[in-house]
């Protein structure tokens, strides 16, 4: 049983996207007060001078015992860091108590659609995942493709992630037309039927908002949302208040 996911309904997960610990604390407080089940911190958004064990433990301690999902991508304040540096930071986050660690599917070998099959990178990812597991954390593997994928492409990526040791699958596609939106809904339903592991299947693009709001109801896994919107938050993410209303409506408050 997952240490991160709520059993029986979507896990309301508030994104923490902030440059400073002070702003992160504000968002955490709003999330706790708003009834969040969990938090998701984009560590790559945090200025590097604050990325210390002392700072992490302080922020994690403000989450009222809620589990934390962390990402550390090659973007934002992490731009220019090596993949080895990012991996070491993930291990620090696991040691500090993060419950779910995001490992990029092309870590150690940047690749098309953010998934690598290069043997050395594969082996290094497996070693990293084993280390993360040894600290008691789970692993979510992510592949941000930012394009519409066929069902076969999605299933191939999901299988690679699963076989590599991921506990939760994450794939991000695109929905730039109404047809692409419906294609993504169809793939979401098929994943729910055919995948044995929990998954986070998202899309970006002009038509992504409906999918961001409704797909988590279908998957019954992670529901990403924000306590409030600002210049660092993902515009397509619904507010916690809205997400909670939808979950309460479908699953009972």
Image (spheres, grey):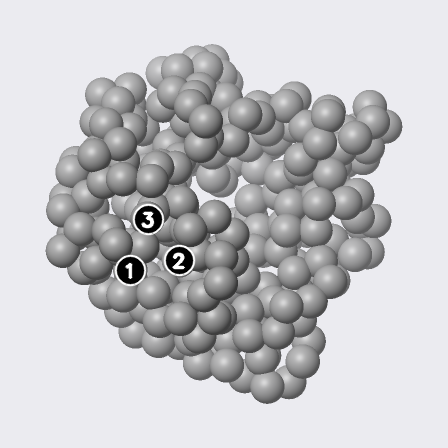
Q: Disc 2 versus disc 3: distance between alpha carbons? A: 19 Å
The disc, 2 or 3, on the residue closer to the chain's N-terminal end is 3
CB atoms of marks 2 and 1 within 8 Å: yes
Front label number (2 vs 1): 1
The disc, 3 or 1, on the residue closer to the chain's N-terminal end is 3
Q: Which residue is mark 1?
A: 93
Residue at the image point whose x is 51% and y is 52% from the top: 75
Residue at the image point whose x is 71% and y is 31% from the top: 205
**Residue 115: x %, y % from top left:** 66, 65
**Which is nearer the eye, 107 or 186?**
107
**Residue 118: x %, y % from top left:** 67, 80
> Which quadrant: the C terminus?
top left
Q: Which mark is residue 101?
A: 2
**Residue 157: x %, y % from top left:** 69, 61
Q: How many marks are shown on the rendered structure?
A: 3
Residue 160 seen in render: no
**Residue 12: x %, y % from top left:** 40, 31
Would you identify the image quadrant in which residue 20 lies? Answer: top left
- Is residue 70 positioned above or below 245 on the image? below
**Which is nearer the eye, 105 or 151?**
105
Q: Which residue is mark 3?
A: 47
The disc, 2 or 1, on the residue closer to the chain's N-terminal end is 1
Residue 142 seen in render: yes
Secondary element at image label 2 = strand
């Amino acid at each position: 049983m997952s240490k991160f996911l709520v059993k029986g309904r979507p896990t309301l997960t508030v994104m923490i996207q902030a440059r400073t610990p002070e702003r992160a604390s504000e968002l955490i407080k709003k999330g706790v007060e708003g009834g969040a089940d969990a938090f998701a911190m984009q560590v790559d958004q945090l200025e590097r001078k604050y990325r210390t064990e002392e700072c992490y433990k302080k922020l994690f301690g403000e989450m009222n015992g809620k589990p934390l999902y962390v990402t550390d991508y090659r973007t934002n304040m992490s731009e220019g860091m090596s993949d080895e540096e990012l991996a070491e930071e993930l291990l620090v986050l696991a040691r500090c108590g993060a419950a779910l660690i995001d490992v990029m599917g092309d870590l150690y070998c940047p690749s098309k659609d953010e998934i690598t099959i290069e043997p050395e990178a594969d082996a290094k990812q497996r070693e990293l995942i084993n280390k993360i597991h040894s600290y008691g954390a789970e692993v979510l593997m992510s592949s941000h493709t930012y394009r519409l994928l066929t069902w076969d492409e999605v299933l191939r990526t999901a299988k690679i992630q699963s076989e590599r040791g991921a506990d939760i699958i994450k794939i991000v596609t695109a929905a730039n037309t109404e047809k692409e939106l419906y294609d993504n809904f169809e793939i979401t339903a098929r994943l729910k039927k055919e995948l044995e592991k929990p998954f986070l299947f998202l899309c970006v693009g002009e038509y992504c908002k409906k999918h961001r709001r409704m797909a988590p109801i279908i998957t019954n896994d992670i529901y990403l949302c924000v306590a409030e919107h600002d210049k660092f938050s993902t515009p397509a993410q619904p507010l916690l208040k809205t997400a909670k209303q939808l979950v309460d409506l479908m699953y009972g408050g």
